C-alpha cells in the first residue's frame, strides 16, 4: 500500500546510498565497520545526515535529572546523550547514524561504484529447474486446493440467477458444480549455480594483517557474487605444505608454520571440481590468496600444469590475489603472469595493503565473468 | 488521508462523549476534537510529518519515519497520543490499543486542546495550520516542478539549518508605528535653542554654536543611517527574508520555513506545562470518574510508563504533573504569600493548612498565563526540588563521564532555567547587515555561559553564506575568549575579537 511518506523515505534512502557510495573505499578498507545484522542485512555507520544548527555545545551545559544518587555518581552507562531532548551531544560533528542496508543493495552500490559488469552465467540454458505457480482457477481439482471464496462467489452467482437468493436471510450453499479449485502451471526457472572456492596460504609468512585483508576481500567478493547468482556455495581450502578443506571460521583463524606448496591446494581444488562440481552445471570461481612464496620452482611447474589441464578448462574465472608480506618473495605472481598472460580466465592482482582492496576487487570482478 | 484510516467506531465515540463530558464538568474548555484511528504505519507516517496529513516533500520526514518505524518494530517505543493545535483539533488513536489506553489518550488530548486554546503563548498561532501546511506543500511542489527537486531540496536544507533563528516572543510585541521621516521637518535650522528674548538671542544662541549643533545632529543621523539594522535583530530569518539577495522562489521557501518554525515555537516553549497539564487531567478524569474497577491495573501500568524517570533525562510529563499538583496543594492549603515565605518554623510549615481551596482556580490561571520558564521560575521551590529528588548533572572531564554534580537547589534551578531559556537554543541576533561597510553579515551570539557547538556552527555559517551570498561572520566566545568566525564561501577563518 503506498503512503505519502514513501516518497520522502525513498528520498532519504537515496541520500544514504549516496553517502555509502562516497564512503565505500573507507568501508572496504576498514572491514570491521560493517556489522552483520541477521542473514542478509548489514548495518553501516554513516556520517550525520542531519541538518546543522547553531546550538549549545554539550559538555559545559549539563542538565537536570530526577531520582536517587549521590553527588559524583555516574549516570547510567550507555546514556550517550543525557539532557532534555537530547540536546547535549558529546563530541561535535561526531554523530554517526547506524543505517541498515541489505546485502543486495550493498552489492548494487559496489557494482555501481566499481562499474562492475553483470556476470553472464554460463550454462543458463542447460540448467533448468521447474517451479509450480498457481496461476488460475478451474472447476476440477483436489479438495485440498479448493478456493473457498471463489466457490462461494460462484454459488452466490448461481443462486441470484436462479432467484433463490434471499437478501434478508443471506444463506449461500454451494453445490458440487460451484466448486472452484486453484490451478497451476509448471514454469521453467533458469538456474545458475555457482561455487566459490577460496584457497589461502596459511604458512608462517602470512600474518594477521594479511589474513585480515583476505577476510575483507572475500566478504565483498561473496557479496557481489551472491547478488549475481541465486544459489551459491562457498568452499574453503587452506594450505601450507599440505592442503585441507575447512569451514569458514577455521579458514580465517588457522595459522600454520610449515613451508608452502601451492600445488597441494590446487590438487585439492581440482579434485573438488572433478568430484562435486560438474563444469557444465556450475559456475566455478577459485580464488587463491597467498604471499607469493612457493617452496620450489618444481612445485610452481606442477601448479601451472594443474591449472592448465584441470582447473582452467572448468572455471569461469581463476583469481590469484597476492598479499604483500614482509617475508614473501612475491615470485609466484610473476610466474603466473608469465605462463597465463594470454589467458583471459586468469586474473592476478597484487594487494599492497587495505587501501588496495578496492582496486583488487575491481581487477577480479571487472571482467564480467 | 491515506489508506491507513479506519472508520471511527461507535464504542470509541461513546468513550469520547463520556470523557469530554467529564472534562467539561471540570471546567476544561477545548476546541471540538476530531479523532482518527490509525494503524501503526500510518501513525508513524503522521508522526513523521509532525501530526499533519500533508507536508512539503523532504527527506527529513523520511528519516524520522524510518527511525519511528524501527523503534516501533523493535518494541522500544510506541506513539500513544498525537494531537495538533488547530481548530477543530485533530487527534490520532492507535488501532488496537486497549479501551483503557484509548480513555487515557482521550482525556490527555482534552487537556492538550484546552491548553492550546487557552494558553497565552498559543494565542497567535494559526489555527488553520492544516490548510497552511497543505498550501506550503503545494507551493514547494510547484517550485520543485519549475526549478528542479535537487535545487529546491538543497535550499530547504539550508533554510532548515537556520530555522531556530527566530524570536518566539516577537508575535506579541506591539511595535510602535515607525516615526514618519522626522527629517522632513527637521532639516531646517530648528536646532533646539535656549529660550531667550529676541534681542538677547544672538548672544545666548550664537550662530556658530547653532551651526555646530546642527552639524553634530546631521552627523549623528548619518551614522545612524549607516547602522543597519538600527537595532540588533533577533528574528534573523525575518531579516534574511527582507534583505538577503534571494530569488522569489527562495524567498518563498524561507518564508515557509519561518512560518512553520513560528507555528511550532509555542509548543517548545510550553513542553513541560503542556504535558503536565494533559497528564494532570487524564489522571484526574480517569481516577475520579472514568475508570471501571477492572481497568485500574492497566491504567496504573500505562501511567507508570509515561511518568517514569531515568537518569540524565528530565521527563516533562512527570515534572509538569507533579508541579501542577504541588501548586494545587499549596493554594488549597494557603501555602503562599508573604506570611508563608516569612515563616521560619519548619513545624508550622509542615502543618500549614489555611483551607483556602484555591488550588483548582490557581492552576487554571497558571495554564493560561505561564510558559515553561515562568512556570519553573515561579513555582519550582526548594521544598518541591527536595521532595522530587532533583539533581544537576554535568560532564566530568576527570572521569570522562556524565555525573551528578549537585543537589543544591540554586544550582538545580539555575541549570533548569538555562535549559529552558530561548527553548534551549542559543541567543543569536543580527548585529550588522553591512559589516565593515562591505555588505557582509555579522551575527552575534549572546553568550550565556555555554559555548556553541563549533562543528555545527561552522556548517551553519556555510548555510548562512548560501543565503546571504556575501561573507558571514559570527561573533561569539569560546573558552572565555572572544572570537569571530568568518565564512567566505566554503572557507572558514577564525580570529580573536573583542567580545563585550
Image: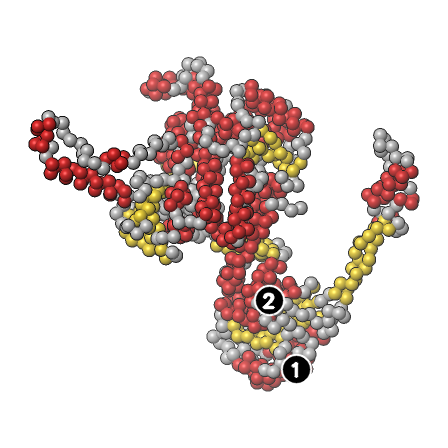
Rounded to the nearest whole Å, what is the CA distance between mark 1 and mark 2? 24 Å
The answer to whether one can see residue B120 in this image is: yes
The answer to whether one can see residue B74 in this image is: no
User: In x, y percent, where is residue A75?
Assistant: 44, 42
Residue A117 is drawn in which quadrant?
bottom right
Does dot 1 land on a helix, a strand or a loop? Answer: helix
Q: Residue visible at 84% across and 50% down? A: A137
Circle 1/circle 2 CB separation < 8 Å: no
Residue under mark 2: which chain is it in?
A: A
Residue that label 1 marks: A308
Sequence-earlier tag: 1 or 2: 2
User: In x, y percent, where is residue B88?
Assistant: 56, 30
Which dot marks residue B199? none
Above or below, B44 against B283 in this view is below
Q: Is residue B480 left or right of residue B304?
A: left
Q: Residue visible at 44% across and 14% down? A: B355
Front-most of B129 and A149? B129
Front-most of A257 and B419? B419
- The quadrant the C terminus of chain A occupies is bottom right
Q: What crowding class fits label 1: few (fewer than 14 Cα within 10 Å), some (14-19), or many (20 or more)?
A: few
Above or below, A135 against B98 in this view is below
Above or below, B99 against B249 in this view is above
Q: Is residue A183 left or right of residue B235?
A: right
Q: Is residue A83 left or right of residue A103?
A: left
Residue A240 is drawn in which quadrant?
bottom right
Residue that label 2 marks: A221
Does dot 2 land on a helix, a strand or a loop? Answer: helix
Q: Residue visible at 32% across and 54% down? A: B494
Q: Residue visible at 20% across and 38% down? A: B217
Q: What crowding class fits label 2: few (fewer than 14 Cα within 10 Å), some (14-19), or many (20 or more)?
A: some
User: In x, y percent, where is residue A164?
Assistant: 90, 35
Amino acid at each position: 500500500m503506498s503512503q505519502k511518506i514513501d516518497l520522502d523515505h525513498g528520498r532519504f534512502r537515496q541520500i544514504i546510498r549516496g553517502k555509502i557510495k562516497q564512503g565505500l573505499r573507507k568501508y572496504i578498507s576498514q572491514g570491521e565497520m560493517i556489522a552483520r545484522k541477521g542473514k542478509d542485512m548489514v548495518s553501516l555507520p554513516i556520517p550525520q545526515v542531519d541538518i546543522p544548527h547553531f546550538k549549545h555545545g554539550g559538555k559545559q551545559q549539563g542538565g537536570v535529572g530526577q531520582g536517587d544518587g549521590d553527588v559524583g555518581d555516574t549516570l547510567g552507562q550507555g546514556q550517550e546523550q543525557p539532557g532534555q531532548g537530547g540536546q547535549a551531544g558529546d563530541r561535535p560533528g561526531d554523530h554517526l547514524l547506524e543505517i541498515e542496508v541489505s546485502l543486495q543493495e550493498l552489492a548494487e552500490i559496489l557494482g555501481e561504484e566499481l562499474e562492475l559488469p553483470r556476470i553472464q552465467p554460463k550454462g543458463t540454458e542447460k540448467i533448468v529447474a521447474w517451479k509450480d505457480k498457481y496461476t488460475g482457477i478451474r472447476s476440477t481439482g483436489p479438495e485440498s486446493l479448493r478456493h473457498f471464496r471463489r466457490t462461494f462467489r460462484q454459488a452466490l452467482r448461481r443462486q441470484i440467477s436462479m432467484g433463490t437468493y434471499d437478501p434478508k436471510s443471506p444463506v449461500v450453499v454451494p453445490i458440487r458444480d460451484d466448486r472452484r479449485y486453484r490451478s497451476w502451471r509448471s514454469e521453467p526457472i533458469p538456474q545458475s549455480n555457482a561455487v566459490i572456492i577460496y584457497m589461502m596460504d596459511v604458512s608462517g609468512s602470512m600474518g594477521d594483517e594479511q589474513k585480515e585483508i583476505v577476510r575483507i576481500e572475500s566478504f565483498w567478493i561473496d557479496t557481489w557474487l551472491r547478488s549475481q547468482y541465486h544459489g551459491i556455495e562457498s568452499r574453503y581450502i587452506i594450505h601450507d605444505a599440505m592442503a585441507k578443506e575447512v569451514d569458514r571460521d577455521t579458514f580465517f583463524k588457522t595459522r600454520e608454520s610449515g613451508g608452502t606448496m601451492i600445488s597441494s591446494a590446487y590438487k585439492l581444488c581440482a579434485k573438488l571440481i572433478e568430484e562435486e562440481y560438474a563444469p557444465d552445471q556450475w559456475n566455478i570461481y577459485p580464488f587463491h590468496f597467498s604471499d607469493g612464496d612457493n617452496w620450489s620452482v618444481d612445485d610452481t611447474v606442477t601448479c601451472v600444469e594443474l591449472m592448465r589441464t584441470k582447473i582452467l578448462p572448468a572455471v569461469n574465472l581463476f583469481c590469484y590475489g597476492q598479499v604483500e608480506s614482509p617475508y614473501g618473495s612475491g615470485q609466484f605472481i610473476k610466474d603466473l603472469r608469465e605462463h597465463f598472460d594470454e589467458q583471459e580466465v586468469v586474473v592476478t592482482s597484487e594487494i599492497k595493503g587495505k587501501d588496495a582492496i578496492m582496486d583488487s576487487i575491481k581487477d577480479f570482478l571487472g571482467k564480467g565473468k | 488521508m491515506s489508506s491507513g484510516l479506519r472508520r471511527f467506531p461507535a464504542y470509541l465515540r461513546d468513550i469520547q462523549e463520556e470523557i469530554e463530558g467529564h472534562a467539561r464538568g471540570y471546567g476544561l474548555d477545548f476546541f471540538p476534537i476530531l479523532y482518527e484511528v490509525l494503524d501503526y504505519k500510518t501513525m508513524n507516517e503522521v508522526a513523521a510529518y509532525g501530526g499533519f496529513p500533508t507536508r512539503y516533500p523532504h527527506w527529513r520526514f523520511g528519516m524520522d519515519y524510518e527511525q519511528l518505524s524501527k523503534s516501533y518494530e523493535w518494541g522500544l517505543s510506541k506513539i500513544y497520543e498525537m494531537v495538533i493545535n488547530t481548530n477543530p483539533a485533530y487527534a490520532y488513536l492507535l488501532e488496537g490499543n486497549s479501551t483503557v489506553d484509548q480513555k487515557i489518550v482521550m482525556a490527555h488530548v482534552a487537556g492538550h486542546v484546552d491548553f492550546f486554546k487557552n494558553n497565552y503563548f498559543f494565542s497567535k498561532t494559526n489555527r488553520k495550520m492544516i490548510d497552511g501546511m497543505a498550501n506550503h506543500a503545494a507551493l514547494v511542489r510547484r517550485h520543485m516542478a519549475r526549478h528542479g527537486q535537487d535545487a529546491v531540496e538543497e535550499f530547504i536544507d539550508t533554510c532548515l539549518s537556520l530555522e531556530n533563528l527566530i524570536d518566539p516572543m516577537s508575535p506579541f510585541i506591539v511595535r510602535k508605528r515607525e516615526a514618519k521621516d522626522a527629517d522632513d521637518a527637521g532639516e531646517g535650522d530648528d536646532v533646539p535653542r535656549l529660550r531667550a528674548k529676541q534681542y538677547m538671542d544672538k548672544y545666548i544662541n550664537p550662530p556658530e554654536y547653532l551651526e555646530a549643533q546642527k552639524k553634530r545632529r546631521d552627523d549623528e543621523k548619518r551614522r545612524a543611517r549607516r547602522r543597519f539594522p538600527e537595532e540588533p535583530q533577533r528574528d534573523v530569518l525575518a531579516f534574511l527574508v527582507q534583505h538577503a539577495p534571494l530569488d522569489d522562489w527562495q524567498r518563498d521557501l524561507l518564508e515557509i520555513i519561518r512560518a512553520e518554525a513560528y507555528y511550532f515555537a509555542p509548543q517548545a516553549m510550553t513542553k513541560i506545562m503542556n504535558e503536565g497539564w494533559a497528564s494532570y487531567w487524564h489522571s484526574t478524569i480517569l481516577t475520579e470518574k472514568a475508570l471501571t474497577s477492572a481497568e485500574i491495573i492497566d491504567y496504573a501500568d500505562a501511567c507508570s510508563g509515561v511518568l517514569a524517570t531515568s537518569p540524565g533525562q528530565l521527563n516533562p510529563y512527570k515534572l509538569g504533573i507533579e508541579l501542577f499538583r504541588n501548586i494545587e496543594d499549596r493554594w488549597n492549603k494557603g501555602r503562599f504569600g508573604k506570611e508563608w515565605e516569612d515563616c521560619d518554623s519548619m513545624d508550622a510549615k509542615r502543618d500549614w493548612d489555611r483551607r483556602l481551596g484555591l488550588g483548582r482556580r490557581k492552576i487554571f490561571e497558571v495554564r493560561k498565563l505561564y510558559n515553561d520558564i515562568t512556570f519553573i521560575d515561579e513555582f519550582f521551590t526548594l521544598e518541591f526540588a527536595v521532595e522530587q529528588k532533583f539533581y544537576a548533572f554535568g560532564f566530568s572531564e576527570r572521569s570522562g563521564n556524565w555525573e551528578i554534580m549537585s543537589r543544591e537547589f540554586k544550582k538545580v534551578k539555575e541549570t533548569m532555567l538555562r535549559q529552558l531559556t530561548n527553548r534551549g537554543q542559543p541567543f543569536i541576533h543580527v548585529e550588522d547587515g553591512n559589516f565593515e561597510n562591505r555588505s557582509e553579515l555579522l551575527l552575534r551570539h549572546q553568550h550565556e555561559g555555554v559555548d556553541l557547538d563549533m562543528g555545527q556552527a561552522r556548517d551553519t555559517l556555510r548555510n548562512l553564506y548560501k543565503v546571504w551570498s556575501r561573507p558571514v561572520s559570527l561573533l561569539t566566545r569560546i573558552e572565555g575568549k572572544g572570537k569571530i568566525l568568518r565564512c567566505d564561501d566554503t572557507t572558514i577563518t577564525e580570529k580573536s575579537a573583542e567580545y563585550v
